[in-house]
Amino acid sequence: MIADKRKQKEKEFINLEKILDDQSALRRGKLRDEKLEKVEASLARARALIREAILNPQSTLDLKDSDYVPRGDIYRNAHVFHRSYLLMEKMFKIFVYEEGEPPLYHYGTCKNIYSMEGLFFSFMEQDKRYRTRNPDKAHVYFLPFSVVMILEHLFDPIIRDKAVMERTVGDYVRIISHKYPYWNRSIGVDHFMLSCHDWGPRATWYVKELYYNAIRVLCNANTSEYFNPKKDASFPEINLITGEIVNLTGNALPPSDRSVLAFFAGNLYHGKIRALLFKHWKDKDKDIQIYEKLPEGISYNDMMKKSKFCLCPSGHEVASPRIVEAIYAECVPVLISKNYVLPFSDVLNWDSFSVQVAVDELPNLKKILMGISEDRYLRMLEHVKQVQRHFLVNDPPKRYDVFNMIIHSIWLRRCYYGHNFKHKGKDNNEARVELIPAILELHVGIKAYVVVRITRKWETIFPRGVIPISVDLLFADEKDIFHRFEDMVREGDVYKICHFLVLDAKPSYNCVSSTYDIYFDTSTGLELITDDIDRFSRFWFRLASLDEINQRGEHDPVLTNVVGMLLSITEVIPVQKTSADLTDKKI
């Protein structure tokens, strides 16, 4: 009976998606692609089953898995991960473009700090579970160029001509886009590249569809450099010095024999965060041992194994191989970074097996670590042991290991980010930009359009002034641009807004607190939307607190007539208010 209801729910979800897709295609006048529809139907079924696991965790209890059943606090949702992982193994297909010859393509080094890039290429070339030779059955398409190899063989360290990357990557995309229909069909949305080099993100700059649309699987997962965790995937940096993958774990000391509170060894001149770590703790405290170079006779691995916490500061780039080294040594990793999206963080609960210390909290490092109770530390240590399987390198790969976790990250993004992407018809040459589901998904540098309802429109003016400096939340970055939009928007209507710039919000002139500002210019377009608009809220405002009002009055002399929603009532407190005519009133 339960199974029948489950199947009925699956059909409902799949049918609803198909109806929406068909209606959308008809409105756009697109030609139907039956092969693609089969692929999308399989993904719709997967989404329905994953959704069921979210809504009803008990539905996963009957899943059969002889090797391993994800359980415990190391997962954000073990039931959903298990369901998703099994679906991936059963359904997910990857087509690897065969164009290109080693060493620039289909190959990478399998030792040193870039080892995971080379190992992924090697495993993917030999794979029999996910790889398909029939591109019409593929869910994603792999672009097998190696950033490490391109730089090693083509980049001259003296001339430093970065255009070699542009030429190599750009030419490869042009070749496969002319030979196959798949890149042009999706404008790259169902394609992925992978790189563990610091310049991995840079390699995608030169083809805008690769940068904005494709799934970028990167070690250097830095949101300040426009890594987008909704479509891009982070994977771990693993330094296999000799290339050997045997005995990566084991021989760890019990907690009672770990005499060092925290340990780090590495180059001081490798980024600002390390410099701060050395400044505050080098030779300052015997419990926190910081070395630029270990003394002769002291083993790096032995030091990790006899430390309770292993410090993992970012270097020039955000990723650090010390994170995985700490996990292998059963040493709780202490993550010190900014803007780093941790590997597999859509599945793993990093708080359960690591400590994250903000850069500005480095002076309090010992206090933070000493504040972790013995019980909590022991729980974290057990979680480190449990999570090891997801970072282990095996040849051939084993279920749930690091290779399969990378594949799972790609699977999730194809299931959700790649869902309902706009396909180009033969008569449509529009460049694709991302449709983001909510303003909250904005980030600096995004290329996107949004669909929003104008719930309130007002003008903001300086005291003593008569000319508005902005309308609603539309802040112009060119003089008087906002007048172009003043008569184009109406309260209560829904608009698609294209071609705008997203920047970090400035502390001044914000009538509503926000993380980002949207700037309009002469290229901004507004399109009135009339279909299916009931899903957009008509009102959403927050009243400013008294502290905010006082701070605004002191620093930001901007007057607005904002309407808010009453969230709570407190005792009445008389406050001074400066009105538009600059006379003081009490309210």
Image (spheres, grey):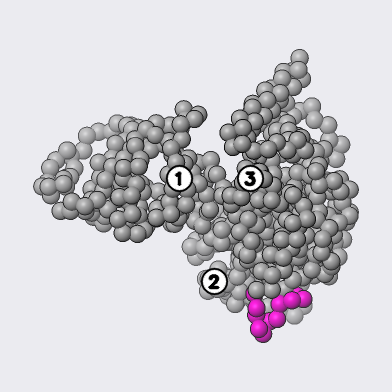
Q: Residue at x 51, y 57 (%)?
A: 445
Image quarter (top left, top right, bottom left or bottom right) of the C terminus:
top left
Measured in 3D between alpha carbons, the distance from the residue under mark 2 to the one under mark 1, in whole angstroms, is 39 Å
Vertical placement of residue 68 versus 240, above or below: above
The answer to which of 221 and 417 lies nearer the viewer is 417
Q: Report whether 561 appears left or right of 391.
A: left
Q: Position of residue 19 (x, y in %)?
A: 64, 27
Which mark, residue 88? none
Q: Report whether 483 appears left or right of 581.
A: right
Q: Residue at x 35, y 59 (%)?
A: 478
In this view, the residue farthest toward the left is 583
- Asked whether residue 153 is drawn in magenta, I would say yes
Between marks 2 and 1 in the image, the one whose residue lies nearer the viewer: 1
Q: Residue at x 73, y 38 (%)?
A: 33
Which mark, residue 272? 2
Secondary element at tag 1: strand
The answer to which of 45 and 379 lies nearer the viewer is 45
Examine the image and state in which quarter residue 120 appears: bottom right
Measured in 3D between alpha carbons, the distance from the residue under mark 2 to the one under mark 3, in whole angstroms, is 51 Å
Q: Which residues are magenta?
A: 152-162
Mark 2 or 3, nearer chain start: 2
Classify mark 1: residues with Cα within 10 Å, few (<14), some (14-19) or many (20+): some
Classify mark 3: residues with Cα within 10 Å, few (<14), some (14-19) or many (20+): few
Mark 1 or 3, nearer chain start: 3
**Residue with the mark numbered 3:** 427
Q: Position of residue 442 (x, y in %)?
A: 50, 49
Amino acid, disc 2: Lys
Q: Position of residue 547 (x, y in %)?
A: 29, 47
**Residue with the mark numbered 1:** 497
Examine the image and state in which quarter residue 136 appears: top right
